[in-house]
Amino acid sequence: MAKVRLLKKKAEAEQESAVSDVRLYARKIWLAGLGAYSWAEQEGSEYIKELIRTGEETEKNAKRVIDQKVEAANTELDAFNDDVAETVDAVESRLDRIENAFDRRVASALNRIGIPSRHDVDALSAKLDGLTALLERVVNKK
């Protein structure tokens, strides 16, 4: 029996040693996990801060480039608008000259065939009004 007791004690000691080893390894794994978590938190937050800084710089540069492009486009539009305004003015001036030349030629043609112009009709109408007023005064005096 003494031998059985010795074997039992030896088995218990080996079992305690195995449990102790498992606890030791479990503790090391736990500590390694905590270390990894802490390292990831430190490195991760620094990495996120660097990403934010880079994003802000990129945004600032993009805004600057967009502002430059918008300014260039506005300058081109202003120049185009000026060109269009000049062209419209030139076309209107040409149309006015064409219209005046057309009016003169039509008036000349009508005058040649004996049709009075508007000016002639207005002058005649004014003379008639004057004569009518004179006749009414003469008739009213009698």
Image: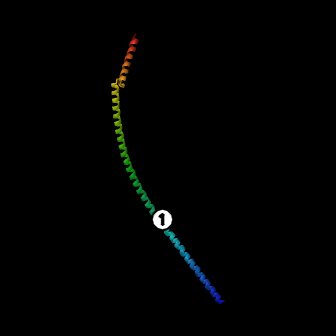
Observer-nearest of 123 and 41: 123
Outermost residue on the top side: it is: 142
Rendering quarter of residue 93: top left
Q: Position of residue 68 (x, y in %)?
A: 38, 52
Horizontal side, residue 38 vs residue 78: left or right? right
Residue 132 at x, y percent in the picture: 39, 16
Mark 1 secondary-structure assignment: helix
Which amino acid, mark 1?
Ser
Q: Position of residue 125 (x, y in %)?
A: 38, 21
Crowding near pointer 1: few (<14 within 10 Å), some, many (20+)? few
For the point 35% across and 38% down, which residue is it? 91
For the N terminus, give its image quadrant.
Answer: bottom right
Provide residue 40's location: percent of width, then percent of height: 49, 68
Q: Residue at x 39, y 55 (%)?
A: 65
Towards the viewer: 114 or 62: 114
Question: Which residue does the image show at 57% across and 79% down from the upper left?
Answer: 20
* 89 over 62 or under it: above or below: above
**Residue that mark 1 sits on:** 45
Q: How many marks?
A: 1
Vertical comparison of 74 with 41: above or below: above
Kindly identify the residue that appears in the image at 41 percent across and 53 percent down: 66
